[in-house]
Image (tube, helix red, strand yellow):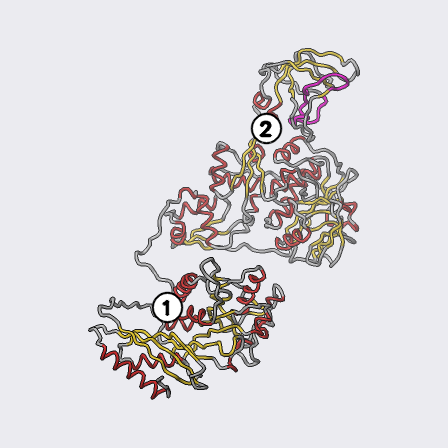
Amino acid sequence: MVFSADGHDFPAAFESGPKMKVSLSWLSDYVAIEKDVVDLADALTMAGLEVGAICDRYDYLRTVFVGRVVTVKPHPNTEKLKVCEVDIGDRIIPVVCGAPNVDRNMLAPLALPGTLLTDGSSLKSGIIRGQQSEGMLCSESELGLGPEDAGLMNLDPSLCIGKPLAEALGLADAVLELELTPNRPDCLSMIGVAREVAAIQKNRIKYPDIVLPKSIYHITDKTSVSIEAPAHCPRYAARLLIDLTVGPSPFWMKDRLLSIGIRPINNIVDITNFVMMETGQPLHAFDFDRLAENRIVVRTAQDGEVFTTLDQKERVLSRDMLLICDGKKPVAIAGIMGGLNSEIGSETRRVLIESACFDPVSIRKTSKKLGLATEASHRFERGVDPETTVAAADRAAQLMAAVGGRLIDGVIDEHPGRRSRTLIRLGLGETRRVLGVGLDQNTMSALLRSIEFEVKADGDGILSVLPPSFRLDIRRPEDLMEEVARLSGYDNIPTTFPLIRADTRRFSRSIDLRKCIRAFMTGFGFTETINYSFIHELSCDRLGLSKTDFRRNTIRVLNPLTEEQSVMRTSLIPGLLGTLQRNITQQIKHIKIFEVGKVFIGKGDDNLPEEIEMLAGLWTGTRQAPCWCSHGEDCDFYDIKGVVEELLERLKIGDLRFTRLSDEDCTYTRPGRTARILFGEEILGLVGEVAFDVRSHFTIKQPVFLFELNLELLSGISSEIRFYRPIPRYPSASRDLTVIVDKDLETGAIIAHARDFGEHLVEDIHLFDVFEGDPIPPGKKSISLRITYRSSSETLLDETVNALQKKIAMKFVETFGALLPG
């Protein structure tokens, strides 16, 4: 249930909050409605005030018909009731009635079962004191069509019997349901919507005349207002009335409130609600005699302070919440709800009217923390017009005086947060360019003046515009351009297409590279992962990084989401190993994953970190996914190395070298099974098997192979140039060469030298065998290479191939001290 400014409950129709219901009969008090309701709804929607629904407030009368009383007989079981027969055109039904003026042949409204009455009950057929009653003859008040009356509503005899009552009496009042954006709190009032309708129809708005009666005494002799938190309350106005009698509101006010779904309470509460819906300024009425020391103090709450609101709930407050207090205690949570200790009751005789302007941010935070939303808070948290504060208090005082109260002279108006309106300069040419419409200066000026903007032409196509105080959302020229666009009609802006150049721009080199890498890696059967850029602070220890390793220069996160995400990552490996571990726990043992992302190397507290984009991948499990045609061989170092070689080849990076990483340089990889990747003398990354200790930190029991590459270095050496090479016209010739070399000699160095010795005729070199043991001497190994020769200009003769093969063998002997078998 939602509460009004006075804390009284609204019906369910008002619980949505952001919507504004507008009755056209009420709206017509302020502006003449010249458009059909559907056309008006369309026009308001195109002006930025979306109409979500249209309904007829008299729709509840669809089950009420014009009936003719055919017979009237005394009730056999009670003197106060009569048994009638009522003709409703197509049938005659029995009705038990207690109205004193019921008479034979009179026409009166007859409500059939299912009719919703003004007290909220639904009419049902039944037996009353032993007599069947299938309907109800109604008075004006029971149908919400007039003041309290003990008798039936006596209809004109000329009306057609059996016709729906609303149709017979010409009752129609369309209610528009506006779904407003948060920047338009000025339209959370009848006057605000009337202002927009007047601008659409190009007619004038009529404001209510506020004429206050003669008053006695002076308010400053009776009360005072002290604002101790001016940042939260820039303006507070108060008026005082005495000799009031709390009772029902006049019918016209009840009718106005009911037209938009507000249930009348009493004349004082109804007036505050009426003025709020009329002006958009929420009000609060205090029982003046229940205010200690008969004065108001506006202050912030103390931490833990407890206050009981009108809904009889205790609220625990904090120091940033604003309170309205009397001389001793809080009496209201500012802008949201009043307290039980100052509630208007039947014994109330003196009333203090509060009309204030509160800081929207303060009200929004308080409402959210307390979980308490009201029609008042809905308006205050979006911003109310500070210039309406006193006028709304005067309007409420005028209405309360009209129902029997006496007004105390004067008004208290504390205004410590007075602000001047800002002049905005609007350029004609810039407005035309942004809107794409050739509006002239006079048209733009007229449109803005229609919603009460002050406009002055400064020459050179410049307008000086002063927004009205109720348009808190207008702060810059672009806001004025939007006003011009919506008032001239969005549908009047022609549809145009932007000029698109025929030439296209390529993505940046880094974007292209990442796109290619992702395509290649997924083609190799790898799955991309995206891990958080935050890792556990012990990740460097889990990787076994040395104390001097630059990757220990981590950056601590001030407010980490969890303990596992307390520092920025300096390597992609911890995140990938974590992903691997989670998959293994789900019985997924064959995994190939990669990640492209940045690492962050700290450069001291006063410097930004160095951001390096990296590529890393992991492979564990079998070489191929298990199936009936394979034996599920485990992957090894050469599988992951092959992936890196193929990737770099597709990126057009040649002249690569893989050199063994020394045991002391191996941190999170296994010594003897790790290679550094070099381009010239530049280190691009590494490839190897994850060390056992590192795997144990991540509770991974099976072998894991990884690679890391620096994408920023790859971007600099990767070539976008593609070379065409024709299909060879001449056949190739292959020869096998076996040499015995030192065990620690890298085969890659031997292959590189073979290409240099080959006089450009070596097309390919393939290592197909490595052997150690008897009869190979200790400390030596035998390697077998298959060398493919080809010429692009002739068919090679055996003599030429054999001579070149012998030359390469002798160079191995000279350069590496190799031995030739046999």
Along the viewing direction, whichever of 696 and 12 lies nearer the viewer: 696
235 lies above or below 170? below
CA neighbours of label 1 inside 10 A, class few (<14), some (14 to 19), many (20+): some
Residue 804 part of the magenta-drawn span:
no
Please give the residue where the numbered disc 1 appears in the rendered image.
651
Lateral position of residue 585 relative to residue 451, left or right: right
Which portion, as a residue range, is magenta?
127-150
Q: Quadrant of residue 17?
A: top right
Asked if residue 47 lies left or right of residue 767, the reply is: right
Quarter of the picture containing the N terminus is top right
Q: How far from the left and from the top, in percent, is residue 114?
A: 65, 25
Please tell me which residue lies in front, 435 or 468. Answer: 435
Q: Please tell me whether residue 148 belongs to the stretch shown in magenta.
A: yes
Residue 37's x, y, as percent? 50, 33
Q: Is residue 452 left or right of residue 346?
A: left
The residue under the point 33% across, 53% down is 499
Q: Position of residue 212 (x, y in %)?
A: 66, 40
- Lower position in the chain sequence, tag 2 or tag 1: 2
Quick check: marks 2 and 1 in contact, CB under 8 Å? no
Q: Is residue 104 above or below residue 198?
A: above
Residue corresponding to mark 2 = 59
| Residue 557 appears in the picture as rendered | no
Q: Would residue 427 be visible to someone looking at this image?
A: yes
Residue 76 marker? none
Q: Looking at the figure, which quarter contains the C terminus?
A: bottom left
Q: How far apart are marks 2 and 1 (CA)?
A: 73 Å
Element carrying mark 1: loop
